Amino acid sequence: MSTADHPTAQDADRLALQARDVRFDFAELPADWIPTEPFASHLIDVLHLLLPEGERWFVDVFSRALPLVHDEALAEDVRGFIGQEAMHASSHQGALDRLIEAGVDVTRYVQQVEWIFGELLGERGLSGDRAAEWLVERVGLVAAIEHLTALLGHWVLHSPALDAAGADPVMLDLLRWHGAEEVEHRSVAHDLYLHLDGRYLRRIRSLAIAGPILVKLWADGVVALCARDPRLAGTPGARVRLRDWLRASRRGLTPGPLLIAKAVLTYLNPRFHPARHGDTDAAVAYLALSPAARAADGTGEPA
Ligand SMILES: [Fe+2]
Ligand SMILES: [Fe+2]
């Protein structure tokens, strides 16, 4: 499909995507890294359970798609994307390891996530045309998920309530460094999908599949973490958690339902392109300040 109608990552403000070799020291991380806000802390902690496997799967899918790219600028973006997502996976893995060290048993949940990305969304032993078709299908799913991660990245870059609540600075830096890179590379998966296929209905179907599965996985993760927290043990159940989520999101401590509604509505537009949404300047500005990114490029103190 021609990309003539679409702004692309190769447009005027195109960034050369770089994988920053960041380090985060979670040795001093409190369980409530948003003080006195266990629910909001757990809701965001679900990212550490989902992202290591999910982003390693992105890397695998994009590494398989890279030989099919016949546009050097896009191929360079895909390589940059792969490098950034690999660092995201290992950084969130560090946070997950910290949770496990602190005695939070998430084995069953993480095994379920591993099965989804490793088996259900894996290679399936296909070959020839069926393997090629399955690869494009998965690029479409990654593009839909990347639409969500770009919106989440924008949210966390504009979340002063977390600072006001005294959120742990190392965890905030992890989230905002990651969010900034999601905003930086928000066009790559969409451009790759346009390059390989680009059909509108398949794009919408991808969000219709990936969106509800992610929401369900996220909700299950919140319930799993809250059920292990003695302070929240008296309030189990999905209805209570939904009320807690609405309350936390209204206070600006977590993303809320409006973000999901915006994600769906913008994606339905046949002329949707991520370059028209999001704020690259805010991402670049944060990366210039991020302690981890500055340490990685030698302009700041190591963590
Ligand atoms: Fe990421
Ligand atoms: Fe991403």
Image (spheres, rainbow, N blue to C red):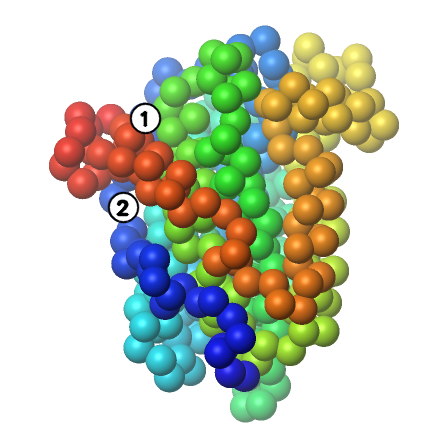
Residue shown at 35% from the left, 35% from the top: 286
Check disc 2 and give the amino acid type.
Answer: Arg
* Ligand 1 within 8 angstroms of badge 2 C-beta: no
Q: Nearer the viewer, residue 268 or 87?
A: 268
Label 1 SS: loop
Residue shown at 45% from the left, 45% from the top: 279
Check disc 1 and give the amino acid type.
Answer: Asp
Q: Which mark is residue 25?
A: 1
Percent across and percent down for residue 76 are 31, 68
Q: Residues within 10 Å of mark 1 (few under 14, many from 20)?
A: some
The residue carrying mark 2 is: 20
Percent across and percent down for residue 212 are 74, 51
Residue shown at 67% from the left, 69% from the top: 270
Q: Is residue 118 left or right of residue 263?
A: left
Query: N-terminal of the two: label 2 or label 1?
Result: 2
Is residue 24 depicted above or below 116 in this figure? above
Q: Quadrant of the C terminus?
A: top left
Marks 2 and 1 sit apart, C-alpha to C-alpha, by 16 Å
Label 2 SS: loop
